[in-house]
Structure formats: structure tokens, C-alpha cells
Image: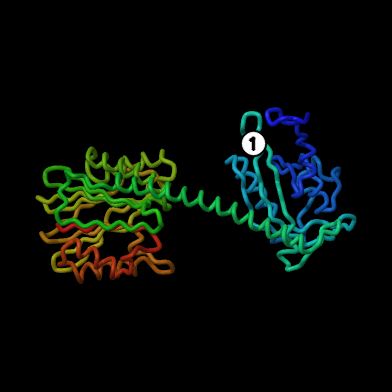
């Protein structure tokens, strides 16, 4: 009797690999060839002894006449991804010419369609990959090539169509994974935004407008704003900008925002709060070169105390429309240099009905333009419409600066009627 389903026959996997119809290599992380099947030998015109134990770049050196070819670099990156993730990595078709056997210095133009599949090791961590390729030179060059052995062109075309269909399905699966990953990242980002930028219910928010416009698609960024009730009818207002965009910058932003919120409650004024924040930023990866401005508005005394670390200056709009840039207490961004004498701090008086605008650089900076031009547009908009309520004024400012729907950079804007 033959073997039953419950007792399957032993399979010689080495023999199975040898006769697999698709050209395959087994590679280490350093692209050293540890095994090769017959199809690969046939398509490259090599002997097994020429390849086993040799680095792929040594067995198939790059064509010196094609310095722009990046197939080997792309392959190395793909193999690294496959080993790091434990998942199959599908590469786009690559141009990589191969030396013609027995003709030194002569290369044959070739195009390849590779897939790298990690092989689980004894501890389930892959150390090798199966590098499967298809020679798509004829397809890309619009030719019908015969395999050695006399395959019919029509049969070869059918094989190629089947291969392209299989690759399309693999790419469809990868795209779906990317879509799901993006959806998860977006949900995390929105949760971060709702949590980190939720106004403090204890803060008096009358006559305050806030606009938050991330440049990316995740609706979260490294810009932030903060309003803190300090008691005694004093309000602390701050905006900051972490270098970068997206979820990573948002995580750094959350740490710095929380630290500054705590510091301004305990420190003696904005300069002391930025001093604490600067020391803290040195211990947070990605926090260096963050810019921030912190203000404390004393309503009974009608004064604004402020300190700035590399940030664009707030704008104070007097009731008559005259604008003043609060640039009298400016230091470099966080972590750029130590401040042995502490951060600078300045005080300015205001009249009832004045307006204070704090913002991040995405509101005023434009590529190829001096920042003074953006500041002039901002002060012009604030001066011309300073009598509007803060909500309406914030919308007008965004419209006149051309960023109502967002800009090339993240934007945070806070408008306070004093």
C-alpha cells in the first residue's frame, strides 16, 4: 500500500529547491550565497561552484559602464527589511547587468523582478532569505525571449502574465497592510490630539480663539499651544514648535507641552519656566532645537511678561491698530546652547481692548521669502481687523495669509483679547 494521508512521505526539500522552476538563491544577511537552484544557474549561465560561498556582489559585480544602477543597494535594503520584520519583501523590477561568462569586461543588459522571503531559524528569528527572481528583460524591452531549451514564446508570455498577476496580488496585500497601518496611526494621532490639546476646563477662555492646522494627513503635528490659569486673574499663554512632523514629533510635543505646563505653574515667570524646559529637553530624544514662547498676562496690572526661545515674536495689537513685535527677550531654541545667566525676560504694558497673537512659523514663513515679509503680512492683517472678535480675527488672519486650509508647514495660532 502507498503512504496514507496520516503518514505522509518524507520530502527531500533540498531536491525540491533544486528543481523549483523559479530562479532562487539562499542568501545571508551579508548577501553571501549559501545555495542556488538549477533555474538560477540556467538563467544566469553560471555553474554552482562559481556561486556557492561567494558574496553576490563578487559573483555578479556591478557594470562600471552603468554607475547609476542601484540594484545591489536596493537588494541589500530589501533583505535587511525581510530579516528585520520576518515578512516577505517584494521589490520593484530592478535593472542589473551581469557579466557575460568567458568575456571579461563585457556585460549583458538584464532586468529582474525579485522577492525576498525570510527563512525562520531555530529560534524563529530569520537569518537567511530565499531570493527569488524572474528575468523580465524580454518583457521590459518588448521582446519575446526563449529560455534555453526551446520554450515557445507564447508559453513564455503566459508565464510572464501569470507572474505579473501574482505580483499584483502580492502588492495588493501589501497596500492593504499599509492602509490598515495608516488607519491605526491616524487613530493614535487623533487620540493624541484630543488628549494633549484638550483645553483646561479651569482656564478662563473668554475672548480667546485657537487655530491648529497640521500640514500632514494625520491631523497631528509638533506644534502646540497652552493656556494655563495661574490664579489672581493671570493667564499663561504659550506656543511651541518641535522639529519635524507627524506622530513622532507629536510624541515629543506632548512631553514638552506637559513639562512647560507644570513649569509655568511653579517657576518665577516665563524665563524660569523656559530654563526648566530647556534642561528637560536635553533628555528627550528629538526635542533639541524646539522653539517656544511663553507669556504671562497679568490682567489687573495690564502687563505681559514674556520670554522666547528661538520662536517668532508674539504680536501685541493696541486698540488703535498699532502693532508691536514682542522681540525684546529672545534666546536660541532649546538645547542649542546653555544659558548660564538664564533666559531673558521682558515686560510690556497694554491697554484694555488690546489683542495678543501667538503663532508658529508655519503662519508667516514661505519658501524662498524673507520672514520679514510674512511678519509684515501678519501685522497688516491684525492692524486692519483688530476690532473683530478673536474668533473672526483668527479666521481673517489665516485667510489674508493664504493658509485657511493649512500650509506647507504646521500652524498653531492663538488670539487673545486682553
Across and down, in percent, residue 74 comes to 65, 52
Q: Dividing the image into 4 quarters, which one contains the N terminus?
A: top right
Is 67 located above or below residue 19 in the figure? below
Viewed as shown, does residue 135 lie left or right of 171? right
Residue at the image point whose x is 21% and y is 48% from the top: 236
Which residue occupies 59% across, 54% down? Answer: 169
Q: Is residue 205 visible?
A: yes
The residue located at (12%, 47%) in the rendering is 233
* Above/below status of 170 relative to 394: above
* Image x and y of residue 310, in percent: 35, 53
Secondary structure, mark 1, is: loop
**Quarter-of-image position of residue 48:** top right
Q: Position of residue 380 (x, y in %)?
A: 25, 70
Residue carrying label 1? 126
Location of residue 80 in the rendering, given as x and y in whole percent from the top left corner: 63, 44
Quarter of the image with the C terminus in it: bottom left
276 left or right, relative to 83: left
Residue 199 versus residue 187: which sits nearer the camera? 187
Q: Is residue 326 visible?
A: no
Q: Quadrant of residue 19?
A: top right
Amino acid at each position: 500500500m502507498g503512504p496514507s494521508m496520516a503518514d505522509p512521505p518524507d520530502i527531500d526539500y533540498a531536491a525540491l529547491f533544486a528543481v523549483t522552476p523559479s530562479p532562487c538563491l539562499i542568501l545571508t544577511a551579508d548577501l553571501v550565497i549559501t545555495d542556488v537552484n538549477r533555474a538560477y544557474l540556467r538563467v544566469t549561465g553560471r555553474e554552482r561552484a562559481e556561486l556557492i560561498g561567494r558574496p553576490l556582489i563578487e559573483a555578479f559585480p556591478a557594470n562600471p559602464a552603468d554607475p547609476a544602477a542601484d540594484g545591489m543597494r536596493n537588494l541589500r535594503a530589501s533583505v535587511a527589511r525581510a530579516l528585520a520584520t520576518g515578512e516577505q519583501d517584494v521589490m520593484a523590477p530592478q535593472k542589473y547587468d551581469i557579466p557575460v561568462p568567458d568575456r571579461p569586461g563585457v556585460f549583458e543588459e538584464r532586468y529582474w523582478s525579485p522577492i525576498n522571503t525570510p527563512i525562520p531559524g531555530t529560534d524563529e528569528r530569520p537569518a537567511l532569505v530565499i531570493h527569488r527572481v524572474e528575468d523580465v528583460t524580454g518583457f521590459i524591452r518588448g521582446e519575446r525571449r526563449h529560455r534555453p531549451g526551446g520554450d515557445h514564446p507564447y508559453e513564455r508570455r503566459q508565464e510572464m502574465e501569470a507572474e505579473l498577476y501574482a505580483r499584483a496580488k502580492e502588492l495588493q496585500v501589501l497596500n492593504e497592510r499599509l492602509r490598515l497601518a495608516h488607519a491605526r496611526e491616524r487613530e493614535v494621532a487623533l487620540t493624541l490630539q484630543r488628549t494633549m490639546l484638550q483645553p483646561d476646563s479651569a482656564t478662563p477662555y473668554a475672548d480667546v480663539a485657537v487655530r491648529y492646522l497640521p500640514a500632514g494627513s494625520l491631523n497631528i503635528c509638533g506644534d502646540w499651544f497652552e493656556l494655563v490659569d495661574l490664579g489672581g486673574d493671570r493667564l499663561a499663554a504659550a506656543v511651541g514648535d518641535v522639529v519635524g512632523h507627524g506622530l513622532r514629533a507629536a510624541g515629543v510635543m506632548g512631553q514638552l507641552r506637559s513639562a512647560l505646563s507644570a513649569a509655568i505653574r511653579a517657576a518665577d515667570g516665563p524665563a524660569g519656566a523656559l530654563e526648566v524646559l530647556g534642561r528637560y529637553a536635553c533628555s528627550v530624544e528629538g526635542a533639541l532645537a524646539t522653539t517656544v514662547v511663553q507669556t504671562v498676562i497679568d490682567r489687573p496690572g495690564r502687563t505681559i511678561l514674556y520670554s522666547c526661545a528661538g520662536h517668532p515674536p508674539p504680536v501685541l495689537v493696541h486698540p488703535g491698530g498699532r502693532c508691536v513685535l514682542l522681540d525684546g527677550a529672545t534666546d536660541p531654541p532649546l538645547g542649542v546652547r546653555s544659558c548660564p545667566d538664564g533666559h531673558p525676560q521682558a515686560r510690556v504694558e497694554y491697554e484694555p481692548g488690546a489683542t495678543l497673537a501667538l503663532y508658529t512659523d508655519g503662519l508667516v514663513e514661505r519658501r524662498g521669502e524673507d520672514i520679514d515679509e510674512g511678519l509684515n503680512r501678519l501685522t497688516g492683517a491684525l492692524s486692519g481687523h483688530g476690532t473683530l472678535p478673536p474668533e473672526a480675527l483668527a479666521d481673517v488672519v489665516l485667510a489674508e495669509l493664504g493658509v485657511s486650509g493649512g500650509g506647507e508647514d504646521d500652524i498653531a495660532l492663538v488670539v487673545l483679547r486682553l
